[in-house]
Amino acid sequence: MLKKKVAYKDFNGERQTKDLYFNLTEAEAVRLDVSFPGGLEAHIESFDPEVRPEDILNLFEKVIMMAHGVKSEDGQRFIKTEEAAKLFRSSAAYSSLFMDLIQDVDQAKEFFNSMLSTTTVGNRPKPKKRRRRNENDQAESENTNSESGNE
């Protein structure tokens, strides 16, 4: 889990500071990874910010919204609901965080690396392709089973 302190000006013009929490479970990280052809790393490497800067913005928003949640007071749950996401997206804290990340490459790298370091994205083994059995494999398997008495 990543705790990020964000300073912002609320809609009353008051300066505020808020702790925001972000977490991707391994399952969520894998889901994120496979949502891009070739995986997240390949997707990031294919970016050309000069041609399509919206690709980077869309990825930032996707990851931020996927990872943001509200930690329960007892620390036993990390709540991610559509309602919590809507409230966060409409907040000045979200806007401030988003702008900080897109304006500071080092801060963005630190934010995403911190969040993804506790997951398997980029380090997870790629699924092995299942080899189709051909007729020779089938026959060989049958011979092995009959020799061992496993018919």
Image: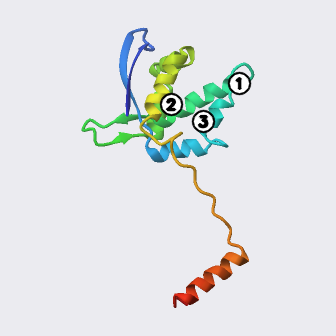
19 left or right of 65 in image: left
Under mark 2, the amino acid is Ile
Residue 108 seen in render: yes
Q: Nearer the viewer, residue 109 or 126?
A: 126
Q: In this figure, which residue is indicated by the disc labeled 3?
A: 41
Q: Residues within 10 Å of mark 1 (few under 14, many from 20)?
A: few
Label 2, label 1: how far apart the Cα atoms are: 21 Å
124 left or right of 54 in image: left
Q: In this figure, which residue is indicated by the disc labeled 2?
A: 64
126 left or right of 81 in image: right
Rendered location of residue 13, percent (x, y): 43, 8
Q: Quadrant of residue 12?
A: top left
Rendered location of residue 60, percent (x, y): 56, 28
The mark found on residue 48 in the picture is 1
Residue at 44 percent across and 32 percent down: it is 115
Q: Residues within 10 Å of mark 3 (few under 14, many from 20)?
A: few
Q: Is residue 34 above or below residue 100?
A: below
Q: Name, please, the residue furthest toward the left.
A: 74
- Which image quadrant: the N terminus? top left
First in residue order: circle 3 vs circle 2: 3
